[in-house]
């Protein structure tokens, strides 16, 4: 038993050793940035310290192994008005299948309305309009290997589009969750968006090329295509701990901390807590991106309620406030149903 515990602890330490060697900021060097927008008002209100809490359907985003701990079918819906009239949506569904494990599916979408095409010559618009949108479709599976250790993964299809250009890729998430015998403390780990690079392609890169402008009479309209660069997906490694420091019939207080290593920024810490009163009213707060240079994210807070609807359905309503500094704030609502 001691050997098993040592192997599990060593497994969690390997990524910290690998990723913790060099501190380099590479902001703006990855594609599909919408994958970094966090899902779930509950998790956001707790400062994004959720990889080890991970006990609702938003585990599909944070740590897919967490869905193995859910015993009933669950649905979560999140709708957020992001910056500049951009809309962010997330829908997740999980279905426990007994000893076979648990399966889940998710849709993440970022969309906007049509905008005028403006140029230097026509600053008020050319008469054309363009739009842009991103979508990610995920299929997840998780299983409890023991009564303390769970593992899970997600396969994702990612697609981005702006006017006549588009790009697609596939990616994988993998996560583990381990419950220790130290007052039930949980340790979670996940790696998100491990996949192919993305490259925009479409008719906007098609041009006519003159191979030698100094020669008269040569073909100056040879069909050609401009090459666009490839960009990596926003790979995110998270490891965190969570523990119920107060747990009774009427009250519960959960504390959580996550260490985060993205491939396009510096390492940071997320802190959060959740206080539950009679498992019906929930108060949450946290702080994001500690130690990140030039971060506009910080304080988060929120509330939640749970109510038995028609006795057989549990209704969850969560609200989160997230401070974004000079960008003001974002307010999120999510709705959950447990059957």
Image (tube, helix red, strand yellow):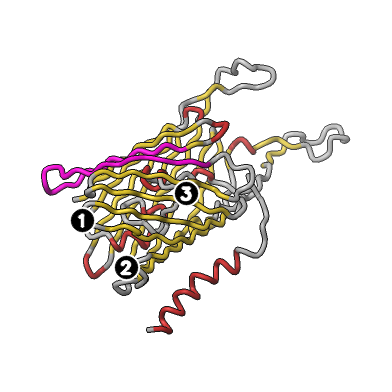
**Span highlighted in magenta in the image:** 298-322
Task: Tell me where residue 154 appears, x and y as whole percent.
Answer: 40, 59
Q: Residue at x 55, y 67 (%)?
A: 15
Q: Residues within 10 Å of mark 3 (few under 14, many from 20)?
A: many
Identify the disc placed on residue 143: 2
- Pick the front one: 117 or 258: 258
Name the main secondary structure of what is drawn in magenta: strand
Q: Residue at x 30, y 41 (%)?
A: 304
> Image quarter for residue 108?
top left
Q: Which residue is mark 1?
A: 249
In reply to whether residue 313 is colored magenta, the answer given is yes
Task: Tell me where residue 196 appears, x and y as whole percent.
Answer: 55, 56
Which of label 3 and label 1 is nearer to you? 1
Q: Residue at x 36, y 45 (%)?
A: 42
Q: Which residue is mark 3?
A: 158
Q: Residues within 10 Å of mark 2 (few under 14, many from 20)?
A: many
Q: Is residue 263 above or below residue 107?
A: below
**Disc 1/disc 2 C-alpha distance (Å):** 29 Å
**Disc 3/disc 1 C-alpha distance (Å):** 44 Å
- Pick the front one: 136 or 117: 136
Which of label 1 and label 2 is nearer to you? 1
Q: Is residue 21 left or right of residue 3?
A: right
Name which of mark 1 and mark 2 comes first in the sequence: 2
Secondary structure under the numbered disc 3 in the rendered image: strand
């Amino acid at each position: 038993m001691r050997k098993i515990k040592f192997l599990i602890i060593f497994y969690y330490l390997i990524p910290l050793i690998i990723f913790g060697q060099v501190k380099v900021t590479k902001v703006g060097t990855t594609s599909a940035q919408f994958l970094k927008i966090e899902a779930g008002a509950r998790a956001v209100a707790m400062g994004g310290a959720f990889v080890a809490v991970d006990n609702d359907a938003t585990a599909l985003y944070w740590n897919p192994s967490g869905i193995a701990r859910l015993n009933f079918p669950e649905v979560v819906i999140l709708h957020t008005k992001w910056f500049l009239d951009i809309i962010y949506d997330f829908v997740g569904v999980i279905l426990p299948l007994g000893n076979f494990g648990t399966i889940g599916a998710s849709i993440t979408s970022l969309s906007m309305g049509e905008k005028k095409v403006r140029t230097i010559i026509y600053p008020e618009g050319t008469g054309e309009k363009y739009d842009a949108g991103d979508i990610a479709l995920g299929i997840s599976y998780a299983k409890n290997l023991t009564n303390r250790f769970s593992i899970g993964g997600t396969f994702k299809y990612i697609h981005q589009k702006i006017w006549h250009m588009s790009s697609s890729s596939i990616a994988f998430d993998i996560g583990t969750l381990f419950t220790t015998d130290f007052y039930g403390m949980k340790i979670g780990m996940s790696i998100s968006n491990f996949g192919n690079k993305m490259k925009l392609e479409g008719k906007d890169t098609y041009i006519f090329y003159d191979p030698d402008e100094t020669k008269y009479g040569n073909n100056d309209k040879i069909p050609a295509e401009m090459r666009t660069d490839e960009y990596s997906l926003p790979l995110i490694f998270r490891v965190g701990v969570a523990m119920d420091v107060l747990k009774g019939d009427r009250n519960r207080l959960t504390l959580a901390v996550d260490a985060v290593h993205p491939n396009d920024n510096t390492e940071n810490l997320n802190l959060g807590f959740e206080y539950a009163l009679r498992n019906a009213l929930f108060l949450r707060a946290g702080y994001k991106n500690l130690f990140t240079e030039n971060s506009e994210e910080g304080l988060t807070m929120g509330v939640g309620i749970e109510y038995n609807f028609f006795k057989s359905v549990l209704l969850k309503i969560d609200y989160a406030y997230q401070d974004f500094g000079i960008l003001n704030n974002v307010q999120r609502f999510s709705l959950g149903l447990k059957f």
